[in-house]
Image: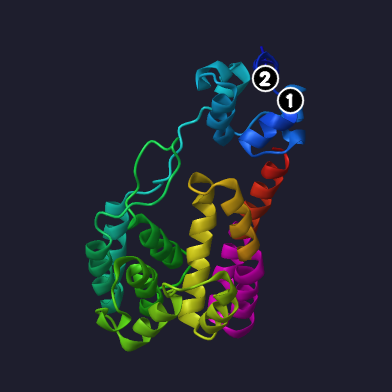
Amino acid sequence: MRIGDVIRTEREKKGMTQAALADKVHVTVQAVSGWENGKSIPDIYNLDCIANALGIGKAALMTDEMKILHWELNDQLFSPENMKRKLLKFAEEEGLENTKEAIDFAFEKHEGQWRKTSLYAKDKVPYIVHPLIMACQAHALGIGDDNVLATAMLHDVCEDCGVDPEDLPVSDSIKKSVKLLTKPEDHKDEDNKEYYRAIGEDPVAAIVKVLDRCNNVSSMMLSFCVPRVTEYIAETEQYTLPLIEKIKREYPQYSDAVFVLKYQIMSILETIKAAMLRL
């Protein structure tokens, strides 16, 4: 039996309309209709909501066509220890003193913090993985600048760990870049225009912000609900993509890197939008 047949059978047993089920699952009536007539399969993230709405166990929905989607999700794609070792090796070989200090400081301050992830992911992911991936990605893209790598490692320390930018163990220029990237506690959506404008005036803060957004959009489906995903896509298109264009025009030292970053960001956004349109 197809999952759509199970949904229809259980819905009708409850005397529930397609509209009522759609309301409970927070999808459109067209989505429910598509499931039931076999035109689409529910996203794996909707299974719990569907099961709860129908008063059945999730296992009842796991027909053969859904079992292929019962994947184990990996959010921790790389070992933090290996990434730290790699970065410290680069820092030693290339004389990146600020980066060495930033790595140790970030590990200390982010200790015990975890990335938000999906219920379907097999592991909790240490928060330090996020800045480590950003710094490693920057270096892999040919950005070996001490300021960029150190700023990538420290970009969330002030906002998430209560550290004052002036207390960071790095140069004044890096402190300035980190401060630009740090949103104040009273930050509101309407403040984003000025926030991104200020970042765009600092080449280090600008490229680190793009690296940050690239990593976040790459993993947002593991942690964001659908409304938050749509908000994040809109914010990325409104602010991050124009920031990339500014970098291309004004900071040519990063032109090759932002070509790759723009491709990754846009391909992820378009893939997610196409998938969501099928829900």
Please tell me in which quadrant of the rendered image residue 23 appears.
top right
Confirm whether the magenta stretch covers residue 260. Answer: yes
- Splitting the image into 4 quarters, where does residue 196 fall? bottom right
Q: Amino acid at mark 2?
A: Arg
For label 1, the crowd category at 10 Å Cα-Cα, with few meaning under 14, some 14 to 19 and many 20 or more, is some
Is the C-beta separation of discs 2 and 1 under 8 Å? yes
Say which residue appears at 39% left-offset and 70% top-offset.
152
- Report the predominant secondary structure element of the magenta stretch: helix
Say which residue label 1 marks: 17
Q: Which residues are magenta?
A: 237-264
Q: Residue at x 25, y 65 (%)?
A: 109
Q: In the image, residue 65 lies at what x, y percent?
A: 63, 20
Residue at 66% over, 65% down: 237
Q: Dot 2: what SS?
A: helix
Q: Which mark is residue 168?
A: none
Within 10 Å of the Cα at label 2, are there few (<14), some (14-19), or many (20+) other Cα atoms? some
Q: How many marks?
A: 2
Give the residue type at disc 1.
Answer: Thr
- 101 relative position to 209: left or right: left
The C terminus - image quarter: top right
Q: CA distance from mark 2 to mark 1?
A: 7 Å
Is residue 277 found inside the magenta-colored segment of the image?
A: no
Residue 114 on image: x %, y %:
33, 52
Say which of 75 and 117 sits in front: 117
Query: Left or right: where does residue 62 sit relative to residue 148?
Result: right
Height in image: 202 above or below 135?
below
User: Is residue 279 shown left or right of residue 228?
Assistant: right
Name the residue carrying label 2: 11
Which of the marked residues, 2 or 1, is nearer the chain's N terminus? 2
Q: Secondary structure at mark 1?
A: loop
